[in-house]
């Protein structure tokens, strides 16, 4: 079997976090069942954020702030799925920087992965087709 070709999505993913009490927690691997739960949560949050997402001037920080303001329970649930902990544990053991540390790189890596796999099949308006 040929060696796997390196892509821009082959970034080191977060493997552990530290709780507010200083306890190091390993981040379990994601399986398809978890990915499906995360996709459902993302879809729910995006529905509440359509206005900020349509604004071309929105920065990543605007999007994160909006997600945290319109759907903090969904963000908490997202982290609980990733860490295999209940929502109360996430709320009691983690702070905002740690929640963001879990959510943002994971969303970014998944978006990069999907786009890298899908882009070869997408023809943008005005592009010549093969």
Image: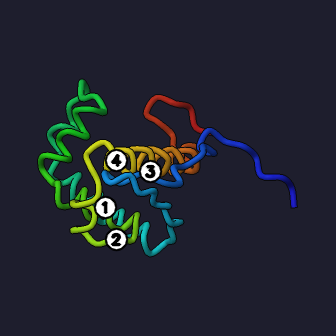
In depth, the one of 11 and 56 nearer the eye is 11
Give the residue at x 40% y 65%. 83
- Label 3 or label 4, whichever lies nearer to me, is 4
Of the numbered discs in the image, which one, if any, rests on residue 106?
Answer: 3
Residue at numbered disc 2: 85
Q: How is the protein colored in the picture? A: rainbow
Q: Do the residues labelled 2 and 1 touch (CB within 8 Å)?
A: no
- Nearer the camera: disc 2 or disc 1: 2
What's the distance in space between the residues labelled 3 and 1, CA to CA? 11 Å
| Residue assigned mark 4 | 98
Mark 4 vs mark 2: which is more N-terminal? 2
User: Reading the chain from its start, which is encountered first: label 3 or label 4?
Assistant: 4
Pointer 2 or 1: first along the chain: 1
Element marked by disc 3: helix
Mark 2 or 3: the one toward you: 2
Instruction: Give percent across and percent down for residue 130.
Output: 64, 39
The quarter holding residue 87 reads bottom left
Disc 2 from disc 3: Cα separation: 17 Å
Q: Compare marks 3 and 1 and give the one earlier in the sequence.
A: 1
Q: Residue 109 placed where, x, y %?
A: 49, 47
**Callout 2: SS:** loop
Q: Do the residues labelled 3 and 1 touch (CB within 8 Å)?
A: no
Q: How far apart are marks 2 and 1 (CA)?
A: 10 Å
Q: Residue at x 58, y 38 (%)?
A: 129
Q: Are marks 1 and 4 in contact (CB under 8 Å)?
A: no
Q: Residue 78 carries which label?
A: 1
Dot 1, crowdedness within 10 Å: few (<14), some or many (≥20)?
A: many
Find residue 82 and report its image quarter.
bottom left
> Label 1 vs label 4: CA separation?
13 Å
């Amino acid at each position: 079997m040929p060696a796997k070709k390196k892509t821009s999505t082959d970034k080191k993913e977060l493997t552990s976090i530290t709780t507010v009490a200083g306890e190091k927690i390993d981040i379990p691997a994601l399986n398809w069942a978890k990915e499906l739960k995360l996709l459902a949560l993302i879809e729910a949050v995006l529905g509440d954020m359509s206005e900020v997402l349509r604004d071309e001037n929105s920065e990543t920080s605007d999007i994160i702030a909006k997600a945290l303001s319109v759907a903090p329970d969904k963000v908490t649930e997202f982290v609980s799925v990733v860490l295999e902990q209940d929502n109360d544990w996430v709320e009691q053991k983690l702070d905002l920087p740690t929640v963001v540390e879990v959510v943002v790189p994971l969303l970014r890596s998944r978006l990069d992965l999907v786009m890298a796999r899908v882009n070869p099949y997408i023809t943008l308006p005005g592009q010549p087709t093969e």
